[in-house]
């Protein structure tokens, strides 16, 4: 892409900001440096970015979004921390993405994500490629959201929780436990079934989907988890191995079906956000 950046005369831009070719900055934006905005990115009116933001190419940031502001964390004392954003993301109105807390740490958004209006991504979060956060999703600090996960409107996620790849969290749900890959969760960290539609759309074979379904029915939907037995389970395919590793590495505990409380530890230690 060629062409000089187009910066509206009412925008306030620090001299340390670096723009790629073809960037557009709309009215009343404020961009603090050091910050880099990749080629072809569009910042519409009243967007706030920086400092210490690295944004890739062809991102579209809608009015009122705030990217890279200081974290809502009492332990933050002005350390230089970062926000890193990939390519071709759609960041809608009034999304807030806060930078990391501890010196050298960062909040990371991958590529091809969609963050809908009013979503909040707190300090030190990781949102992987093609994830979708619908309107009003709130991620507390240190949350990770796996590739292709879909968090429906109004979902609340406790700090340090992990959301697995291609998981679906239904609207208005909340969790303080990890949500395994390919799962559907609703209510209060209640595990329902597998995300068959999401798996099909992602191109998984029928055999893989059935293997994932069998594993869920035998282990995660059947009753309290026996960690020792689970660690000896032979994975029938890489996707089942992915779920096994995710569950065995959990520190917060895994979402469970409604009739079970779950057997892996849930740590409700409090931190900011």
Image (cartoon, rainbow, N blue to C red):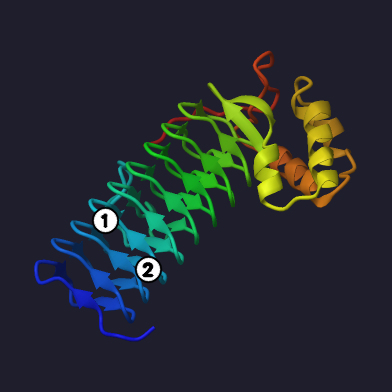
The residue at 71%/46% (across/down) is: 200
Residue 153 located left or right of residue 96:
right
Task: Name the image quarter holding residue 53.
Answer: bottom left
Say which of marks 1 and 2 sits in front. 2
**Secondary structure state at the residue bearing disc 1:** loop
Q: Name the mark on residue 56.
A: none
Label 1: which residue? 78
Residue 3 located left or right of residue 116:
left
Mark 1 or mark 2: which comes first in sequence? 2
**Measured from the top left, where is residue 269 in percent x and y?**
48, 30
Label 2: which residue? 54
Task: Name the image quarter holding residue 190.
Answer: top right
Front residue (pair 218, 184): 184
Front residue (pair 171, 216): 171
Look at the image and tell me in which quarter the N terminus lies.
bottom left
Residue 192, compared with residue 213, is above or below; it is: above
The residue at 77%/31% (across/down) is: 216
Task: Name the image quarter holding residue 212.
Answer: top right
Front residue (pair 91, 232): 91
**Measured from the top left, where is residue 63 in percent x and y?**
24, 53
Residue 126, compared with residue 119, is above or below; it is: below
**Measured from the top left, where is residue 228 in percent x and y?**
83, 32
């Amino acid at each position: 892409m060629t062409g000089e950046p187009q910066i509206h005369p009412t925008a306030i831009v620090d001299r340390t900001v670096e723009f790629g070719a073809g960037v557009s900055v709309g009215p009343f934006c404020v961009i603090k440096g050091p910050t880099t905005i990749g080629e072809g990115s569009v910042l519409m009116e009243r967007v706030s970015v920086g400092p210490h933001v690295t944004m890739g190419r062809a991102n579209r940031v809608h009015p009122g979004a705030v990217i890279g502001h200081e974290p809502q964390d009492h332990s933050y004392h002005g350390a230089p921390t970062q926000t890193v954003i990939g390519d071709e993301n759609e960041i809608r109105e009034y999304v807030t993405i806060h930078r990391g807390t501890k010196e050298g740490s960062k909040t990371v958004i991958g590529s091809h994500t969609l963050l809908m209006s009013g979503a909040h991504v707190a300090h030190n979060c990781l949102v992987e490629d093609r994830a979708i956060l619908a309107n009003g999703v709130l991620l507390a600090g240190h949350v990770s959201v796996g590739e292709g996960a879909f968090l429906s409107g109004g979902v609340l996620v406790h700090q340090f929780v992990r959301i697995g790849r291609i998981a679906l969290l239904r609207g208005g749900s909340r969790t303080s436990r990890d949500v395994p890959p390919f799962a559907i969760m609703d209510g209060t960290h209640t595990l329902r079934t597998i995300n068959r539609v999401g798996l099909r759309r992602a191109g998984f074979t029928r055999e893989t989907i059935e293997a994932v379904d069998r594993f869920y029915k035998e282990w995660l939907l059947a009753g309290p988890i026996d960690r020792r037995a689970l660690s000896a389970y032979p994975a029938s395919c890489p996707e089942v191995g992915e779920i096994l590793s995710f569950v065995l590495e959990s520190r917060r505990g895994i979402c469970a079906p409604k009739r079970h409380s779950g057997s892996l530890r849930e740590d409700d230690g409090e931190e900011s956000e």
